[in-house]
Amino acid sequence: MMLLSIWSLVYIFLFIFSFISFMISIVMLTESLGVHISWLLYSWGSSDVVFTVLLDWISFSFISFVFLISGSVFYYSGEYMEGELNMSRFIFILLAFVGSMGLLIFSPNMISLLLGWDGLGLISYCLVIYYQNYKSLNAGILTVLSNRVGDVFILVAIVYMLNYGDWSFVSWMGYSESLVLVSALLILATMTKSAQIPFSAWLPAAMAAPTPVSSLVHSSTLVTAGVYLVIRLGWVYDFWLNDMLMIVSSLTMFMAGLGACFEFDLKKVIALSTLSQLGLMMYSLSMGMVKVALFHLLMHALFKALLFMSAGSIIHGLKGWQDLRLMGGLFFLMPYLSSCFIISNMALAGLPFLAGFYSKDLILELSLAQELNLLSLLILFVATGLTVIYTFRLIYYVMLRDYIMSGSLNLSDGSGVMTLSCFFLTFFSIFFGALCTWLMMDIPEIFLPFHLKNLTLIVCLIGVLIGFYFSQSSYSFKGVKGNLYSFFIWFSGSMWFLPYLSSQYLIYNPLKAGLNYMKLGDMGWLEYYGGQGISNFLVKVSYMLNLISLQGVKLFIFLFWTLMLFYIFM
């Protein structure tokens, strides 16, 4: 009970900070206020290295959602992580994780931003390997190396910005057209952190972390850092960067939605849904809809945290079991948590008047109102239909089927801590979409033809039908030797072979090449002709001189100076 009271106290403090931050963001938005604070660390030639903080409605609105979800996750962990031996370590790692995200949110400077960016990557590695087994180690290595690629891109951008003498985003507006290379480097960095193709394999692998960590990572911290950075850089664009980001994000949406339709791990299905929604945010950013992307980012944080927490409660009740094929009938055994699970899934699918509806429907209608090619629109709506398909497939497998394994367990909604933490997020997932639409969004009137206006509803209804068909049909897996349909299932369920390609070309080949370069270079000719070789040569010379007697040295010096004088005076 003492432990739960500590979690409750942390939740109350974070909830108060969340409410205050949200009120400040509303005031700053309505009054068009912003505060830019800089501390000069040191000057280097014509460049000033400063630590910068930007306080505006975007940063305060995002940090309010981070505080809200972090408080819910902390309170939720009090029951979920009950019995954990290293609980203090878990608390400090989570606090450091939230602190790194806060540093990233309030930093409009590339140098100070790198502190939070690197902190997220390092602490995420500590969280993924928290259970300390072989699977967690592999997932942690894949996660930290994938994120390290993005860190390298940011470091290269920082070095290139020495030409301009400033690393602040605010001062780039005067010469943004000449920063195409920096924009490309930062967009590549955001693609690694937000797991866009070809860096998508680490996000489902990070499910090796504890479920409260997954709830925090996939809603408002690690994976959203890349999207938030692009929102900060929404005006530093070139047309070909927009096209590249649109292609990559649309393929990520399609790949993740297709993979989730054939996945049987509960947490990996939710992870792939996160990947699909990140692709949707990047897609909207590629079309210049920065404020709409931020709106969907905030709404996604609410219902995705609720989805992970309710799924974690189900996994906790099933004694760690995550396979969908052995679940079923949980709506009658865990009615309240099942209701939270269904509401979060409906918000993910975009059911009208839930949190996800206001942002997703707005993105789709604005896409129809803009001049886009047919293929982009087709992929966008197919990915939306796939979201509805795997959402209703998930609901059918977990809730509506007959009992399989769950009927033999004594399941309930728990002692109340996880249930209460899910209740608050359920409330926000239902009502906060409409509230933020009224308070924060200045939505224009979108006039579309009748068939385009109802296209989203038609796609969602078709997705519901296909989702129930997928749930009730049985498909076999025969690998490459089977028919074309089996190969399609294998190809789609394995995320287009990205995990194999990432582990081979992102981890194994670079590490092996580094070992060879170290043997040939640092331990090879560089050592032979460099410091080690010179040191050995001097040691040999000193040894030879020690063998020569002192008299011999004096005779050598006398003869040398005699010859020199003879040469000079003759």
Image (cartoon, rainbow, N blue to C red):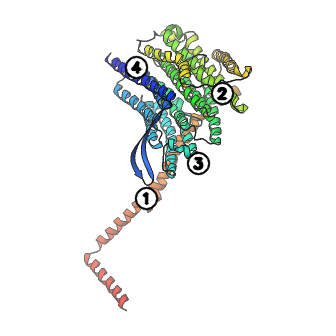
**Contact (Cβ within 8 Å) of mark 1 with mark 3:** no
Mark-to-mark CA distance, 3 and 2? 30 Å
Q: CA distance from mark 1 to mark 3?
A: 42 Å
Cα separation, mark 1 vs mark 2, equals 61 Å
Label 4: state its secondary structure: helix
Relative vertical location of residue 513 with respect to residue 59 in this rendering, above or below: below
Q: Work out whether mark 3 precedes mark 4 in sequence or the reverse, and give the earlier one.
A: 4
Q: Is residue 126 left or right of residue 491?
A: left
89 up-or-down from 114: above or below: above
* Picture quarter with the C terminus: bottom left
Seen in the picture, residue 14 relative to 340 is either above or below; the reply is below
Q: Position of residue 301 (x, y in %)?
A: 51, 25
- Viewer-nearest of labels 4 and 1? 4
Q: Earlier in the sequence, mark 4 or mark 1?
A: 4
C-beta proximity under 8 Å, tags 3 and 4? no
For label 3, count other residues whose C-alpha is less than 10 Å away and answer few (under 14), some (14-19) or many (20+).
few
Disc marking residue 75: 4
Q: Which residue is mark 1?
A: 527
Residue under label 2, please give it.
Answer: 366
Q: Residues within 10 Å of mark 2 (few under 14, many from 20)?
A: some
Could you tell me residue 498's position as x and y percent? Answer: 59, 35
> Residue at coordinates 52% horizontally, 33% vertically from top-left?
228
